[in-house]
Amino acid sequence: MCLKYSNTVTPQPHNLLNMLQGLLQRTCVSALNTAQTLFVRQKHAFDRAVLKPKVRCHFPKPREVKRINVHGWETRMATPEGRRVLMRRILKGRHDLSH
């Protein structure tokens, strides 16, 4: 038996794995805490977002119905002139083609 190498400690695979897991967990927990403090807003008692009621849908208002009936997609596609309007808006690069 060689006594020269008996005093050196070689890391065991399971000890190394436990050490890496602990390091990873500490890193993840600290990153998570940092992200929570940066991105999570504390709710205040007078915060308007908390006190504001849900938004109700009031569609269709009479003018909106007329707008959609006159300028809507189905009406534009129903006639050759309407298709020409849509093609002109496509070629111009408009994001909204119709109502």
Image (cartoon, rainbow, N blue to C red):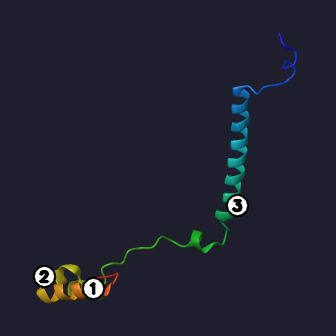
- CA gap, disc 2 to disc 1? 19 Å
Residue 85 vertical position relative to residue 39 in the rendered view, above or below: below
Q: Which amino acid does the dot numbered 2 rest on? A: Ala
State the mark number for residue 78: 2
Q: Which amino acid does the dot numbered 3 rest on? A: Thr
State the mark number for residue 37: 3
Whether label 3 touches label 2, CB < 8 Å: no
Q: Nearer the observer, disc 1 or disc 3?
A: 1
Q: Which amino acid does the dot numbered 1 rest on? A: Leu
Percent across and percent down for residue 51 are 58, 71
Q: Answer with mark 3 or mark 2, whichever residue precedes in sequence.
A: 3
Residue in view at x 71 percent, y 58 percent: 34
Horizontal placement of 51 versus 83: left or right?
right
Q: Answer with mark 1 or mark 3, whichever residue precedes in sequence.
A: 3
Percent across and percent down for residue 85 are 21, 88
Q: Answer with mark 2 or mark 1, whichever residue precedes in sequence.
A: 2
Q: Quadrant of residue 21?
A: top right
Q: Which residue is mark 1?
A: 91
User: From where the camera sits, is residue 62 visible?
Assistant: no
Q: Residues within 10 Å of mark 2 (few under 14, many from 20)?
A: few
Horizontal placement of 56 versus 28: left or right?
left
Q: Nearer the viewer, residue 78 or 6?
A: 6
Residue in view at x 29 percent, y 88 percent: 63
Percent across and percent down for residue 87 are 22, 84
Q: Quadrant of residue 98?
A: bottom left
Label 1 sits on a secondary structure element that is helix
Percent across and percent down for residue 95 are 35, 81
Residue 60 vertical position relative to residue 54 in the rendered view, above or below: below
Q: Residues within 10 Å of mark 1 (few under 14, many from 20)?
A: few
